[in-house]
Image: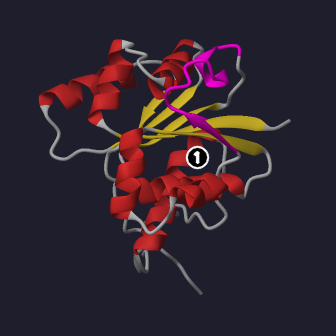
Amino acid sequence: MEKNIIVAATGASGLPLLVQCLKIIKENDDFKSYLIMSDSAKLTLKQETNYSLEDVYSYADFVLDQNDIGAGPASGSFKTHGMLIVPCSMKTIAGINSGYGENLILRAADVTIKEQRTLVIAARETPLSPIHLRNMYELSQMQGVRIIPPMMTFYNLPKDIDEMMYHIGAKLLEPFGIEAKEYRRWTGLYTKKSCHFQ
């Protein structure tokens, strides 16, 4: 049975990560993506990537308008495997934490929380203010919510930014049970003293 994942993007920096996540989902036949992009996300896409809006839409299985508050994800009876917001602005995080369902992204996140489904938030901002930290802390206490800032990792020895983005995308999708094909997991820190190679 196909599993639906709502994938939303806001205007925060990090739109290349959205594209990477959609590509990974596309490789998994068991999952279907429902993409919702805010107007600000569409503007940021032009600034940060060479992808057209049509390019991004082609990686999604379904595309929904952020103002279509009557779309399926606005209701808890619409079955999903959860929701990913990548990138997620602090404005959107504040809206989710306060239950302010102004648009389809915020309403879908609200539904995901109330139905106790997985909600992954790729929080983007630096430095973080006490307000940002408070909102993220309060959300992190809710069942099913995971705050996963797209932080760089180096233990996998990435050769370039594309490999780094792939690794982050894989980590963002792991909570949904999606195993990215090229995801290199941590296998432990080895030294000459701790290993006994023949």
Residue 110 lies, in percent from the top left, at: 49, 17
In the image, 149: left or right of 9? Answer: left
Residue 129 lies, in percent from the top left, at: 13, 34
Residue 154 lies, in percent from the top left, at: 37, 68
- 155 in relation to 174, above or below: below
Q: Quadrant of residue 59?
A: bottom right
Q: Under tag 1, what secondary structure? A: helix
Residue 13 in magenta? no
**In which quadrant of the rendered image does the C terminus lie?**
bottom right
Residue 180 lies, in percent from the top left, at: 64, 58
Outermost residue on the bottom side: it is: 198
* Residue at x 40%, y 68% (from the top left corner): 155
Give the magenta part as a residue range: 62-77
Residue 74 in magenta? yes
Q: Quadrant of residue 190?
A: bottom left
In the image, 161: left or right of 116? Answer: left
Q: Quadrant of residue 177?
A: top right
Along the line of sight, the residue nearer the viewer: 97 or 157: 97
Regarding residue 19, the answer to whether it shows in the image is yes
Judge the density around disc 1: few (<14), some (14-19), many (≥20) Cα neighbours within 10 Å.
some
Name the residue tied to disc 1: 174
- 195 in relation to 24, above or below: below
